[in-house]
Image: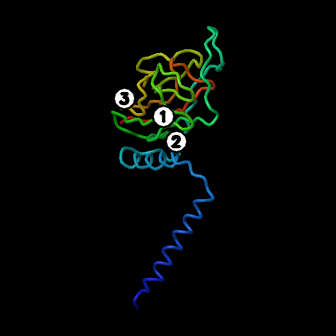
Amino acid sequence: MPIDSSALRIGTASLAALVLAGCAHKAYDHSAMHARHHGGMHARHHGAMGANATPTVPVKLSTSTPTLASGYKKVASPEAARLYFVNLRNGMTVTSPVKVIFGLSGMGVAPAGVEKEGTGHHHLLVNVNEVDANAPLPANDQFRHFGAGQTETSVELKPGQHTLQLVLGDQNHIPHHPPVLSDRITITVR
């Protein structure tokens, strides 16, 4: 029996309207959706994620104060600010060099030295257990700075387990008040 093309057009239009109506009542976090898509894609192509990965113990963070003893007023962070890994998840197994893509919502990225409200720059913490929320972040192999405003990197890591965490710093590499940190994750490098 031949298909009536007008019925097919009406059916397709009805389906599109239903899909759009379903989308209209739900707010989507496009950055989170993007992260889920690309994180899953990365896991399928570059490593596996433990089905029941035990959450990584959070970094020990000193209590943040709005003003330092020197009188320096820390840059305020918006309540909605969120820092996350786009392509890595806790429990993943990866190979070195490890590509790390930084995700940020609720704030913007500005290079170190640039004072602009609602911005900061990324720092990647590798195997760090403690952070002073009231001092400039050190610059070494454990505290990696991205002061040019970079939003991704490739990191050489030895085989074994490593913890990773992102921290946003102000124009002077000092964490915001309150600090903007990602979850701390554990990855295994083969």
Distance from the alpha carbon under mark 3 to that under mark 2: 20 Å
Where in the figure is residue 113, as x and y percent of width and height?
A: 47, 19
Q: Are the residues flagged by discs 2 and 1 in contact, CB closer than 8 Å? A: yes
Density class for disc 2 (Cα within 10 Å; few <14, some 14-19, many ≥20) is: some
Q: Is residue 98 above or below residue 45?
A: above
Camera-nearest label, 3 or 2: 3
Residues 174 and 43: in front is 174
Q: CA distance from mark 1 to mark 3?
A: 13 Å
Percent coordinates x, y for residue 93 in the rendering? 41, 40
Residue at the (48%, 41%) spot, across then down: 89
- In the rendered image, the quadrant that contains the N terminus is bottom left
Estimate the spatial distance between the alpha carbons at disc 2 and disc 1, rounded to whole Å: 9 Å
Residue to which mark 2 is pinned: 53
Give the farthest residue toward the top: 70
Can you tell which quarter of the image residue 95 is in?
A: top left
- Quadrant (top left, top right, bottom left, bottom right) of the C terminus: top left
Say which element carries label 1: strand
Residue 127 sits above or below residue 4 on the image: above
The front one of 176 and 184 is: 176
Q: Is residue 17 left or right of residue 87?
A: right
Tag 2, which secondary structure?
A: loop
Are dots 3 and 2 in contact, CB under 8 Å? Answer: no
- Label 1 sits on residue: 186
Mark number displayed over residue 157: 3
Q: Relative to 51, is 64 on the left or the right?
A: right
Q: Which mark is residue 163?
A: none
